[in-house]
Image: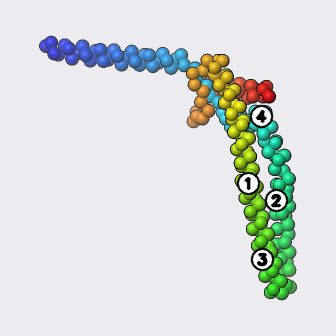
């Protein structure tokens, strides 16, 4: 009988411990302050992100125009070859096809280099914007006593979304 009552007492103590732990966990959840920031919105709406996009646009506009001009020239040469191929000698037709192929290869190479350079610069600029926004997020989190701030989530309640605060702070800081 003594052994039986000790087992029941042990079970009761274990149950009490589980209840206390659950209560402490619920209390911690109730007192925790959680925030969320939508990074995509920051990249679209914040002044530093818009300035970075404008800077990149200006930096790459000349190269983009050159590639567009080269594409138009390639199309023109191709159409001219199609139109003239019936009256060209075999040698001239082969020579012009070779020139067209070389021009197409050059065009594709320039397009690829342009995309790679553009992506690299965009990533550099976005990294700088992200770094600034992370500093602002940290400042807001510390000043408003957030326990944690997430930047990626499947679902977010508007109640904990602090993206507007971050954008406002980024827009006001230079």
Identify residue for label 2: 67
Disc number for residue 98: 3
Identify residue for label 1: 115
What crowding class fits label 2: few (fewer than 14 Cα within 10 Å), some (14-19), or many (20 or more)?
Answer: some
Measured Cα–Cα span from mark 2 to mark 1: 11 Å
Identify the residue at horizontal 74%, vertical 62% (top origin): 109
Q: Earlier in the sequence, mark 3 or mark 2?
A: 2
Disc number for residue 48: 4
Q: Earlier in the sequence, mark 4 or mark 2?
A: 4
Where residue 101 sits, quadrant-wise, is: bottom right
Identify the residue at horizontal 85%, vertical 66% (top origin): 73
**Secondary-structure class at tag 3:** helix
Look at the image and tell me in which quarter the C terminus lies: top right
Label 4 near label 3: C-beta < 8 Å? no
What crowding class fits label 3: few (fewer than 14 Cα within 10 Å), some (14-19), or many (20 or more)?
Answer: few
Measured Cα–Cα span from mark 3 to mark 2: 20 Å
**Secondary-structure class at tag 4:** helix
Above or below — where is 132 with respect to 146?
Answer: below
Identify the residue at horizontal 67%, vertical 22% (top origin): 140
Disc number for residue 140: none
Label 4 near label 1: C-beta < 8 Å? no
Q: Earlier in the sequence, mark 2 or mark 1?
A: 2
Measured Cα–Cα span from mark 3 to mark 1: 26 Å
Measured Cα–Cα span from mark 4 to mark 2: 28 Å
Q: 41 or 110: nearer the eye?
A: 110
Look at the image and tell me in which quarter the N terminus lies: top left
Q: Earlier in the sequence, mark 3 or mark 1?
A: 3
What crowding class fits label 1: few (fewer than 14 Cα within 10 Å), some (14-19), or many (20 or more)?
Answer: few
Where residue 99 sits, quadrant-wise, is: bottom right
Q: Position of residue 110 (x, y in %)?
A: 77, 60
Q: 81 or 139: nearer the eye?
A: 139
């Amino acid at each position: 009988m003594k052994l039986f009552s000790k087992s029941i007492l042990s079970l009761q103590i274990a149950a009490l411990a589980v209840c206390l732990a659950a209560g402490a966990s619920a209390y911690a959840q109730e007192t925790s302050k959680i925030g969320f920031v939508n990074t995509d919105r920051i990249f679209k709406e914040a002044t530093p992100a818009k300035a970075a996009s404008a800077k990149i646009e200006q930096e790459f506009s000349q190269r983009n125009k050159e590639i567009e001009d080269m594409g138009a020239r390639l199309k023109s040469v191709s159409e001219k070859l199609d139109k003239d191929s019936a009256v060209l000698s075999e040698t001239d037709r082969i020579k012009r096809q070779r020139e067209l192929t070389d021009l197409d290869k050059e065009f594709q190479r320039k397009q690829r280099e342009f995309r790679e350079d553009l992506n690299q610069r965009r990533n550099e600029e976005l990294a700088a914007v992200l770094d600034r926004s992370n500093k602002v997020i940290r400042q807001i989190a510390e000043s408003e006593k957030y326990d944690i701030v997430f930047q990626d989530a499947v679902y977010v309640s508007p109640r904990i979304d602090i993206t507007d605060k971050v954008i406002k702070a980024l827009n006001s800081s230079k």
